[in-house]
Amino acid sequence: MHFQEFTLTNENLPSQQQKVLTLIEENEQEVNRLLAIQSKNYQNFVTPYQECSEALEFYFTPVAHLNYVNNTPETEEIYNALLPVLTEYGTKLSQNEEIYNAFKEIQKCEQETLNDEQNKVLIDAIQSFELSGVGLAKEKKERLAEINLALSNVTTSFAQNLLKATDAYEMIVEDFEDVKELPKPDLEAAKSEIEGKEVYKFTLQQPSFIAFMTYSKNRALKERLYKAYTTRAPENDALIEEILGLRDEEAKLLGFQNYAELSLASKMAEKPSDVTGFLEELASKSKPQATKEFEVLQTFAERLGFEGKLQSWDIAYYSEKLKIASLDVADEVYMPYFEKERTVQGLFDFVQKLLGITFKKTETAIWHKSASVYDLYKDKKPVARIYIDLEARKGKRGGAWMNNWVTHHINSKNEKVLPVAYIVANFAASSKENPSLLRPSDVVTLFHEMGHALHHMLSKVNEPFVSGINGVVWDAVEFPSQFLENFAYEAEILKQFALHIESDEALSDEMIEKLKISKNFESALGMMRQIEFALFDMKIHMNKYSADEVQQILDEVRNTYAVITPPSYNKFQWGFGHIFAGGYAAGYYSYKWAEVLSADAFFQFIDQGIFNEDISGRYFEEVLAKGGSRPAMESFIAFSGGKKPDTDALLRLSGIS
């Protein structure tokens, strides 16, 4: 067993770039050697073929990662230079009929003798080849290759436009009255000086943006910041039209009516109508409560002297005040209990008690001083490594995510390769004077991303193509992450680490109960917002649309489902990186689809005891350890003792009756 050691710093990137380029050449030579084998079988063909892919991922993933977390002109140049080369290489492989036929022949001859993991590798690979156009005529293959390269470039441009626009904007506030309600950590983070005068600087980075929108009473300034946020990267408007056009052409080349059908070909949901029907049913059950929640908020704001109808930039401020008034829950009160380092350790302790996993800090070269590295142990044996980078800073992409780097597998030398993952977030940055304090919602985010990481790192699967999150259908990949986040406000867990940073006093039972209740505060409004995004995503991928038509579809979805209608200048689509620069195209619904699985699984623990060894053992062995080696529904049913997931569990979890 071993970790593949590597130095994760920007200084190492030029050598990385050359290594990736060299590996592509070596992989192409190795594939030619494999194709020349007369009697191909799983061991002499499929196993080394997978290793070619793993080797390339090992050297390219850090390049992409550093471009996201420590972005500089150099990282961008190297990443952009490699992307078209990798796209061309990947397209060439995915359309190689000789490789495809070899997989088909091996499946035909060895299906009865191979294990379930190996058969799943073959099933997934054959489908992937077919969805990549392996059987197309030459000219169509060439066009598909051009589309893949174009999509790679344009989606990267979308993401980089968004990052640059986010980093470029700042709003200076001079009057203390406009910021006096901000929590102390947010206020300290915003302090700046211009010509000897103390001012407050706010940006479009998540911690800064959320703090001002939630706690400033100045409506004019909030609208200014809101408008800047919702009109970021206007150049992405043209890119959206290009992306949708390319995706539609790709789908039609592959024999699908639209990109939505192509996307669903490798997911649990079978057709777009399954998805829209699922979302519309959720909407019909949620909208009455969402409407009532908004009416309550409007009435509350009016009691505080607000005149007129609440607008999008008013919601966070009055929702926070209503939450405090009705539930006595304020982020500012809770943040001192969630110091970043202690919260991370609390999460580690919970995972150890739940799954028997121990985290030990290790020293290795890393890209930023605020990031950390830990090795995971099970029964005193190393099983994985994780890199954790949680603080916001310039040059770092917004949001939070888990990225898999190395996958658990047995290599051709019969060595066990241990998995490696990253967790990245954008929580408030620490300083010499102030530690990083998390909002309760940040704690949920941290648990969520750890759920993803555990799914990848605790795999026992020996075939890399179906180990960890590899091979897991997209609309099930959120299951383990959402499952773990549901424990973030449980008293048994919070009592262990939620201690006040100054007094060391534990979070009281009363405060925990209020926090749990607050989790479903305006939950129906949140549900409707996610449904709005998911329906928009699915609908725009059901044809080829212009930028104007995309806006019309968004307006139609909002008119039907949005309880709070945003202003016409809100160009949400320009910043919808999940679907235009990530992997969620015609798949954003998967958050809700997977949430049904996660809610059902969570209540099995809650109803029978969080630290029930039988249930946690089955979750470990049937879900986490199995990775993508079998269909997600099979893993869920094996965990739950033969029971299919109950959709009503999601409504119960959300407090929607």
Image: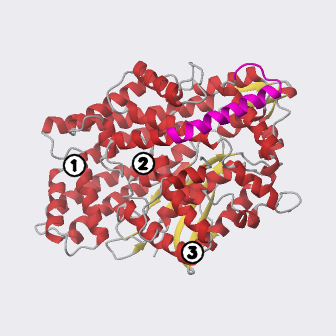
Q: Secondary structure at mark 3?
A: strand
Q: CA distance from mark 2 to mark 3?
A: 32 Å
Disc 2 residue crowd, few under 14, some 14–19, many 20+, Cα 10 Å = some
Tell me: residue 347, above or below residue 377. above
Provide the residue span drawn in magenta: 284-309
Q: CA distance from mark 1 to mark 2?
A: 30 Å
Disc 3 residue crowd, few under 14, some 14–19, many 20+, Cα 10 Å = some
Q: Nearer the viewer, mark 2 or mark 3?
A: 3
Between residues 386 and 594, which one lies in front from this camera angle?
594
Rendered location of residue 509, percent (x, y): 80, 61
Q: Residue at the spot x=45%, y=66% of the render? A: 623
At label 1, which amino acid type do we have?
Glu
- If you read the primary sequence from the N terminus, does the residue marked by circle 2 or circle 3 appear first? 2
Is 295 a magenta residue?
A: yes
* Residue corresponding to mark 3: 377
Tell me: residue 433, above or below residue 358. above
Discs 2, 3 touching: Cβ within 8 Å: no
Image mark for residue 17 = 2
Q: CA distance from mark 3 to mark 1?
A: 40 Å
Q: Quadrant of the N terminus?
A: bottom left
Q: Nearer the viewer, mark 3 or mark 1?
A: 1
Q: Residue at the spot x=83%, y=58% of the render? A: 500
Image side of residue 286 versus residue 461, left or right: right
At label 3, which amino acid type do we have?
Tyr
- If you read the primary sequence from the N terminus, does the residue marked by circle 3 or circle 1 appear first? 1
Rendered location of residue 4, percent (x, y): 46, 66
- If you read the primary sequence from the N terminus, does the residue marked by circle 1 or circle 2 appear first? 2
* Residue corresponding to mark 1: 130
Image side of residue 552 versus residue 169, left or right: left
